[in-house]
């Protein structure tokens, strides 16, 4: 998916009918979206531009269904801007947990971060007839079976043979399929990208859980596996993974986490390979080799 490259004036013009003249300030962007901030009636807002609208509708859905339990920014407006889509939401205070570098502060906020994730994972999604990605407007899901969601993450790396250890990737893929036999059939809410850029902290408290585009339906341990996969690279992810794993009671949790960690890692490998970032893609494969139960 190609990231939009709209200039500020184009986005400002698209906002004028609803918000009047506004002044946009560029913000740190996501991997697939542009972001700007502006004030409207003395209230800070964020406008994001993305090739797809589905993630924005998930943001609105999450605010409606979880806003009473955890801070999720209310979505005010979703509309087309040229061939792309924009979403206006309230701007919540705070900075990303990835920016928390002091170990004492990180230790203090970690239990609150994992508590917020527990609220996410507690949401019963059994009214959806399926697993994986979901459309909050239609109720459609991407897969009939959770196992197919998990095993479907493995990319075809054959075009990159010679630059990537494709044989290692195949072994990871085989292990993934073996572990995916007999997975539980939970239909719960998974954030899908929790714990670094999408978790805001303000005065030691969780002030925002944002960017729900990767949200899906399945086993909540997938979120923990995502934290564990990125733990060697990000102290905030390691702290959260360690805290959550210390409180696990399910006897098969270790094998499920390994299964989902393989899924996360192979998906990341495919993402970076497709982007031409082959050294990072190879690092993702090695990360999987170095983390076994």
Image (cartoon, rainbow, N blue to C red):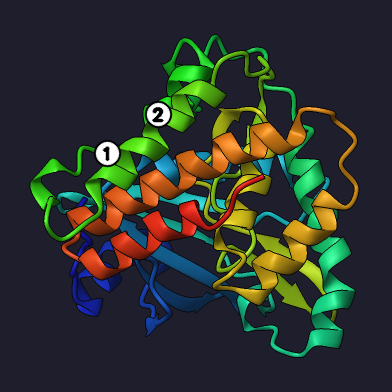
Taking the spot 86% from the left edge, 41% from the top edge, the residue there is 248
Q: Disc 2 on helix, strand or loop?
A: helix
- The residue that appears at 13% across and 50% down in the rendered structure is 161
Label placed on residue 155: 1
Could you say which is closer to the camera, residue 286 or residue 149? 286
Q: Residues within 10 Å of mark 2 (few under 14, many from 20)?
A: some
Q: Quadrant of residue 65?
A: top right
For this rendering, which residue is in front, 77 or 269? 269
Looking at marks 1 and 2 on the same chain, the residue that comes earlier in the sequence is marked by 1
Q: Is residue 26 left or right of residue 110?
A: left
Observer able to see residue 74:
no
Point 77% across, 78% down: residue: 202
Give the structural element (helix, strand or loop) at label 1.
loop
Q: Position of residue 189 (x, y in %)?
A: 66, 32
Figure check: 101 above or below 93: below
Total labels drawn:
2
Which residue sits at x=22%, y=52%? 84
Residue nearest the observer in this picture, 218 or 9: 218
Residue located beneath label 2 in the image = 174
């Amino acid at each position: 998916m190609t990231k939009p490259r709209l200039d500020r004036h184009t986005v400002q013009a698209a906002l004028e009918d609803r918000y009047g003249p506004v002044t946009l300030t560029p913000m740190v962007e996501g991997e697939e979206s542009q972001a700007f901030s502006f004030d409207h009636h003395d209230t800070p807002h964020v406008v994001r531009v993305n090739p797809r609208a589905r993630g924005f509708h998930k943001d609105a859905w999450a605010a409606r269904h979880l806003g009473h339990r955890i801070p999720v920014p209310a979505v005010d407006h979703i509309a087309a801007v040229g061939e792309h889509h924009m979403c206006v939401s309230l701007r919540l205070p705070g900075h990303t947990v990835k920016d928390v570098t002091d170990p004492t502060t990180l230790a203090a906020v970690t239990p609150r971060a994992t508590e917020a994730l527990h609220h996410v994972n507690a949401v019963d999604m059994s009214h959806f007839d399926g697993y994986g990605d979901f459309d909050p407007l239609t109720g459609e899901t991407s897969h009939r079976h959770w196992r197919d969601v998990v095993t479907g993450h493995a990319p075809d790396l054959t075009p990159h043979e010679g630059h990537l250890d494709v044989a290692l990737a195949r072994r990871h893929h085989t292990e993934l399929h073996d572990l995916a036999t007999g997975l539980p059939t939970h239909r719960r809410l998974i954030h899908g990208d929790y714990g670094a850029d999408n978790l805001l902290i303000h005065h030691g408290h969780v002030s925002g859980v944002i960017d729900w585009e990767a949200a899906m339906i399945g086993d909540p341990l997938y979120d923990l596996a995502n934290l564990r996969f990125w733990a060697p690279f990000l102290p905030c992810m390691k702290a959260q993974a360690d805290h959550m794993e210390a409180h696990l009671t399910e006897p098969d949790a270790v094998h499920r986490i390994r299964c989902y960690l393989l899924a996360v890692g192979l998906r990341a490998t495919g993402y970076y390979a497709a982007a031409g970032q082959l050294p990072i893609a190879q690092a993702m494969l090695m990360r999987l080799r170095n983390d076994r139960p």
